[in-house]
Image (cartoon, helix red, strand yellow):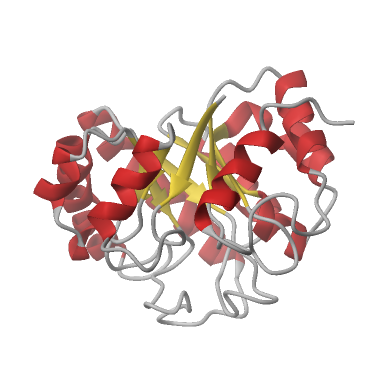
């Protein structure tokens, strides 16, 4: 497994490019969110390996789909410039606080069909540019109230329905624990469709070892299924960022008990 760290949530006292340099120097790949606010030339100069980034600016799986496709294509060009293979999607557009721009508390059958068709269009786009879109599960209970298709069961159902190798899961185990639990069984169900895995502990959304999730056991379950993709730390530092990175590495380089 390759290990990546989201630069949005650690070393937050440093300018963004310097955060990336610190993560890269520590031997991790780097994840980022909204590329439109970043110094792309500066990021390239760091020499870092970038794992994933947000793959759209506006639009939704169920409304303003053309805008979603348009901004997804814009995002692909930046991803290719940085060598990023995976572009992250959510059920709808989120604001800078992570809240849905248009909250949707009820999802209809028609919404499900529209979302699947939108993902099919994204698959064609991804195929054209040789990239992958990954659909991330989110939790509506704490961090993202009003987000549609938030549960891992929802994102998995959509990815399975589209059944295209360019549309995979960004399985976020923090969100799944808040919203669903039963993580090891979830990994087994989701494994054939995984594009990347993200982690943080519960409660608090800090690094592994600071909450209730047995991350060494999670690591062992991923190995058992033969997962050799990327695991990304999308978490705040409980004490300091260097310690958070150390705890993350230890959780995923030791067998679970």
The structure residue drawn at horizontal position 40% and vertical position 66%, both measured from the top left corner, is: 12
Q: Where, quadrant-wise, is the C terminus in this rendering? A: top right
Question: What percent of the width, then of the height, locates residue 17?
Answer: 23, 53
Splitting the image into 4 quarters, where does residue 210 fall? bottom right
Q: Is residue 64 left or right of residue 170?
A: left
Question: What percent of the width, then of the height, locates residue 60?
Answer: 38, 66
- Residue 91 or residue 252, whichever sits in front: 252
The structure residue drawn at horizontal position 75% and vertical position 68%, both measured from the top left corner, is: 203
Q: Where, quadrant-wise, is the N terminus in this rendering? A: top right
In the image, farthest residue toward the left: 41
Q: Is residue 40 visible?
A: yes
- Residue 77 or residue 36, whichever sits in front: 36
In the image, farthest residue toward the right: 257
| Above or below, comparing residue 220 to residue 167 in the picture | above
| Above or below, comparing residue 251 to residue 90 in the picture | above
- Residue 80 or residue 193, whichever sits in front: 80
The mark tally for this picture is: 0
Question: What percent of the width, then of the height, locates residue 144?
Answer: 57, 75
Q: Is residue 47 left or right of residue 221?
A: left
């Amino acid at each position: 497994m390759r290990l990546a760290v989201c630069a949005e949530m650690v070393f937050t006292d440093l300018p963004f490019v310097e955060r990336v340099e610190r993560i890269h120097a520590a031997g991790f790949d780097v994840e980022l969110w909204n590329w439109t606010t970043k110094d792309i030339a500066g990021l390239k100069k760091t020499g870092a390996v970038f794992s994933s980034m947000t793959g759209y600016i506006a639009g939704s799986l169920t409304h303003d789909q053309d805008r979603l496709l348009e901004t997804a294509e814009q995002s692909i060009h930046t991803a290719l410039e940085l060598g990023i293979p995976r572009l992250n999607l959510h059920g709808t557009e989120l604001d800078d606080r992570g809240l849905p721009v248009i909250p949707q508390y009820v999802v209809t059958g028609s919404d499900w069909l529209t979302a699947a068709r939108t993902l099919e269009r994204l698959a064609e786009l991804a195929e054209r540019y040789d990239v992958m879109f990954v659909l991330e599960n989110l939790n509506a209970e704490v961090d993202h109230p009003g987000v549609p298709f938030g549960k891992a069961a929802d994102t998995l159902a959509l990815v399975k329905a589209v059944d295209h190798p360019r549309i995979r899961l960004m399985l976020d185990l923090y969100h799944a624990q808040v919203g669903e639990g039963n993580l090891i069984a979830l990994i087994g169900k989701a494994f054939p469709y995984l594009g990347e895995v993200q982690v943080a502990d519960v409660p608090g959304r800090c690094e592994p070892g600071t909450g209730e999730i047995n991350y060494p056991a999670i690591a062992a379950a991923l190995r058992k299924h033969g997962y050799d993709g990327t695991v990304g730390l999308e978490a705040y530092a409980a004490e300091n960022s260097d310690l958070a990175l150390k705890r993350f590495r230890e959780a995923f380089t030791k067998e679970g008990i």
